Image: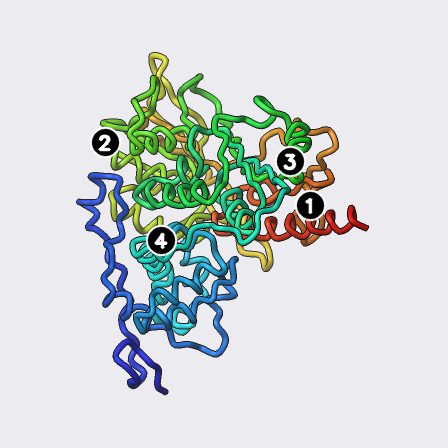
Amino acid sequence: MQHKGPSGPQGFVVQPRRLPKTDASLRVQDFGEIIVPPTTTNIEVQAGRCTDCGVPFCQTGCPLQNNIPDWLGLSAEDELREAWRMASATSTMPEICGRICPQDRLCEGACTLHQSGWEAVTIGSVEAFIGDTAFDNGWVEPIRPAHERGESVGIVGAGPAGMAAADRLREQGYQVTVYDRHDRPGGLLTYGIPGFKLEKRVVQRRVDRLIDGGVTFVSNCNVGVDVTLETLRERHDAVLLAMGVYQARALSVPGGGPGDTIRALDYLTHQNRRDLSDPEGEGWYHAKGRRVVVVGGGDTAMDCVRTAIRQGAAEVVCLYRRDRENMPGSAREVLNAEEEGIRFEWLGAPKALLSKGGAVTAVRAARMALSEPVFGRRREIVPVPGGDFDLAADMVIEALGFEPEAFADHHPDLALTDWNTVAVAPRSAATSLPGVFAAGDAVRGASLVVWAVRDGQEAAAEIDRYLKARILEQAA
């Protein structure tokens, strides 16, 4: 069997997977991205590991259905500009998804090399490199619609779904205004994801491209408070709800008092604001010298523990009620955290907060065990009799996930699902309100950035069809 690598046809020799990271002892000293920037030669070698298999499972594992084998092949041949053209055809944010997607659960997890017992192609690293190279060389074309359209679209939320939709709609010539509650666009890309995974300059250049292309951002505008949904419907020909889900699930255990626990997003936002050089605000959280316990097992929990260690915490422990194999977060992020000195307490569920003198001193946890496996069902967790233990803590961070906010308050006729997310028609982004669409976490619940990008792009296409059909109806 032969395959073409960066040096031409050769026998079937699989090059080792290489994804160099800054040494953990060094990277915990700042909030810079931990992946060492690759050289063109590195990228050619790693992209050339793709076996160009007949059935590209990596593509089916990608929510955006990116043409992964094609742009890997082009990258292996140093055709990076063409690789960028292909990557950007299906994604409005390749260089962002390449950094923060949990590739081990998506494209790389589905890679044929990985499935065959070899290590997967470094798909995410190549994707990020292609995007960075395109920006550095001026290959990212500005948004310049061939024809300006008179119809306007209002988008609620400047996160990945809203930004992706704004990009596609503006390219079609629509007048696009994005409303967001924060003082900067980007949503969780700006305030939720730490700089060691996604430096803010990477988000800002996407925002700058949208602004340069004619997209208007209205910041510090909380829809439902500063402006109503009904006002936006009157102001725009179509409205897209892409506001995400930000209501944190609360830790429900006895003990403690107000301020004894910290919400994960508040904690991460404060550090991201520091990274953006904002003046230190009153009450901003910092873990220096403290014993930190983070409760939860998703990627947000990993962001919190890795932030705390960089802030100089005396000790950082992640408390999760299931075992490592059942962690909802990325295995890659768990490994990064372990390398950086975070301790994991698997199979431990918080039971109470212990306090002294009005301040939390420890988390009491129950030791858990997994029930016997049953086909088609997730294993239950059951407490181990007499297995309680205490974790010393003077800072407890809740990273238990997010729930939808009170979307029903936006309009009495806006239909919701049983999970309080915005209800849309089957295989559609259309809500119960004419001319109002929804995308991203507002529909899915808390999910991945790549799904938000996909939903935003698909919603933009549906809004385009809706507005064009309406013009035809009015002309008839």
Q: Is residue 374 left or right of residue 196?
A: right
In three-dimensional space, the C-alpha distance between marks 3 and 2, rounded to whole angstroms, equals 52 Å
- Tell me the amino acid under the disc marked 3: His
230 lies left or right of 204: right
3D distance between C-alphas at marks 4 and 1? 36 Å
> In this orientation, which residue lies closer to the viewer: 128 or 262?
128
Measuring from the top left, give residue 77's x and y in whole percent: 31, 73
**Quarter location, residue 386:** top left
At 48% from the left edge and 79% from the top edge, which residue is drawn? 54
| Element carrying mark 3 | loop
195 or 460: nearer the viewer: 460
In space, the residues marked 4 and 2 are separated at their CA atoms by: 24 Å
Which residue is the site of mark 2? Answer: 314
- Is 357 drawn above or below residue 343 in the view shown? above
* Mark with earlier residue (4, 1): 4
Residue 424 visible, this orientation: yes
Mark whose residue sits in front, 3 or 2: 3
For label 4, the residue is 332
> For the residues marked 2 and 1, what is the alpha-carbon distance in whole angstroms?
50 Å
The quarter of the picture where residue 423 lies is top right
Label 1 crowd (10 A; few <14 / some 14-19 / many >=20): many
Secondary structure, mark 4, is: helix
Q: Quadrant of residue 193?
A: top left
Q: CA distance from mark 3 to mark 4?
A: 43 Å
Q: Are marks 1 and 3 in contact (CB under 8 Å)?
A: no
Query: Which residue: 73% across, 38% down?
Result: 433
Residue hosting label 1: 430
Q: Which mark is residue 236?
A: 3
* Disc 2 versus disc 1: nearer the observer: 1
Mark 1, secondary structure of its residue: loop
Disc number lying in front (4 or 2) = 4
Neighbour tally class for label 2: few under 14, some 14-19, many 20 plus, Cα within 10 Å? few
